[in-house]
Image: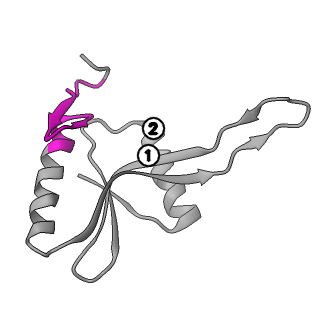
């Protein structure tokens, strides 16, 4: 059992982090087949802050990324970013805030 109660789910050879995410994937695939959305992608990383080397340190700090569950184009050709969330965490809220503030990317939670 995971920390937040989600259950890994496999569909058509793809492993999803939760049943909610797998279910949303099926719904989005149906919309894509129907021509309502295009360019559906999953697990898309967005670099929020580049990696840095702190003064006096030999190690580089890695970049901070938000990995969104789905990205697609709607019928108005706008990019839509979606994350399937059963449990909202402070880290996910902060990362979504940074995505909006730094890159103008609004991430919908479903």
Q: At 76% across and 43% down in the image, what residue appears?
A: 52
Residue 103, picture quadrant:
bottom right
Looking at the picture, how far across and down is residue 82, in whole percent? 31, 56
| 80 relative to 19 in the view: left or right | right
| 5 relative to 43 in the view: left or right | left
In the displayed orientation, state which residue is furthest to the right: 56
Q: Nearer the viewer, residue 44 or 49?
A: 44
The segment highlighted magenta reads 4-22
Q: At 11% across and 56% down in the image, what residue appears?
A: 27
Q: At 34% across and 39% down in the image, what residue appears?
A: 88
Q: CA distance from mark 2 to mark 1?
A: 5 Å
Secondary structure state at the residue bearing disc 2: helix
Looking at the picture, how far across and down is residue 70, in whole percent? 30, 55
The local crowd at label 2, few if under 14, some if 14 to 19, many if 20 or more residues have their Cα within 10 Å, is few
Total residue callouts: 2
Q: Name the residue beneath numbered marker 2.
A: 90
Q: Name the residue beneath numbered marker 1.
A: 93
Looking at the picture, how far across and down is residue 11, in whole percent? 14, 39
Residues at marks 2 and 1 touching, judged by CB atoms closer than 8 Å: yes
Is residue 51 found inside the magenta-colored segment of the image?
A: no
Relative vertical location of residue 16 with respect to residue 78 in this rendering, above or below: above
Q: At 13% across and 75% down in the image, what residue appears?
A: 35
């Amino acid at each position: 059992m995971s920390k937040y109660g989600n259950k890994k789910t496999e569909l058509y050879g793809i492993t999803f982090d939760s049943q909610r995410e797998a279910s949303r994937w099926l719904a989005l695939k149906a919309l894509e087949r129907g021509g309502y959305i295009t360019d559906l992608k999953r697990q898309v990383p967005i670099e929020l802050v580049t990696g840095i080397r702190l003064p006096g340190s030999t190690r580089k700090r890695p970049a901070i990324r938000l990995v969104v569950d789905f990205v697609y184009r709607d019928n108005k050709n706008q990019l839509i970013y979606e994350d399937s969330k059963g449990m909202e965490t402070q880290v996910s809220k902060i990362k979504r805030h940074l995505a909006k503030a730094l890159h103008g990317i609004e991430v919908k939670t479903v």
